[in-house]
Image (tube, rainbow, N blue to C red):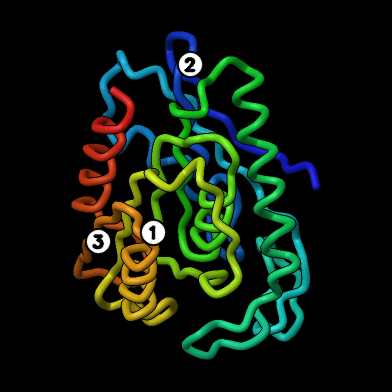
Amino acid sequence: MSLTSIEIEPNSPANASIIWLHGLGADGHDFEAIVPELKLPDKMAIRFIFPNAPSIPVTINNGYVMPAWYDILEMSIEREVDEVQLMASAKSISELIDREISRGIKSERIILAGFSQGGAVAYQTALTYPKPLAGLLGLSTYFATKNSILLHKANKNIPVQIYHGTEDNVVPELLGRQSYDKFKSMGYTVNYATYAMDHSVCIEEIDDISKWFQTLLE
């Protein structure tokens, strides 16, 4: 499955890439406006890539066709999802990483980020990718494949950052904390922070994301 993407190029030739996955029902434009809000230094030549999920019927929305990385079958706390579709999306994101490497970006200079459903795909992709990546960012998300994932040793040392809203009624904060606990139990270096917000992003969070990006890519 080949994905279309929105790409934002830096002013100088890119030497790093951030692939950022949107949530259910959104598209690649959803986080496009966040790039100037990050206020990253001009010297950081980062290419931002915002892929578009395919449009598929979504069971929890009465089969309505919308952009989705995978079908959600049941809105229980554990989120019953179509793992075959999730794996297919992860493969497509892996192909985007491969493409960035072919464009001259070192794998160690590529960050994967994802919001909500996109975060679940980012988790699956980064932890199974066969080359070391710069970092993994989960925003208001959950670890959908935590019981089935087959980890690749290439990213056993990947820095993981998880952010969640304490007032989130779409993906309860409990799921963010469970993801943090799972990463810890698997031996990853993971940090977790919350904000007084719902299923969204806030200015304080954007500032923290910017600092994290700079720590990893400067």
Q: Amino acid at mark 3?
A: Tyr
Name the element at disc 3: strand
Q: CA distance from mark 2 to mark 3?
A: 29 Å
Name the element at disc 2: loop
Q: Quadrant of residue 88?
A: bottom right
Q: In the displayed orientation, state which residue is furthest to the right.
A: 1
Q: What residue is disc 3 on?
A: 192
Image location of residue 101, percent across then percent down: 60, 23
Q: What residue is disc 2 on?
A: 14
Q: Residue at x 65, y 84 (%)?
A: 60
Image location of residue 204, percent across then percent down: 19, 52
Q: Quadrant of residue 140?
A: bottom left
User: Is 59 placed above or below 180 here?
Assistant: below
Q: Residue at x 25, y 56 (%)?
A: 191
Q: What crowding class fits label 2: few (fewer than 14 Cα within 10 Å), some (14-19), or many (20 or more)?
A: some
Q: What crowding class fits label 1: few (fewer than 14 Cα within 10 Å), some (14-19), or many (20 or more)?
A: many
Q: Which circle, 1 or 3, is nearer the viewer?
A: 3
Say if mark 2 contacts mark 3, CB within 8 Å.
no
Marked residue nearer the N-terminal end (2 or 1):
2
Q: Amino acid at mark 1?
A: Leu
User: Is 84 placed above or below 60 here?
Assistant: above
Q: What residue is disc 1 on?
A: 139
Q: CA distance from mark 2 to mark 1?
A: 25 Å
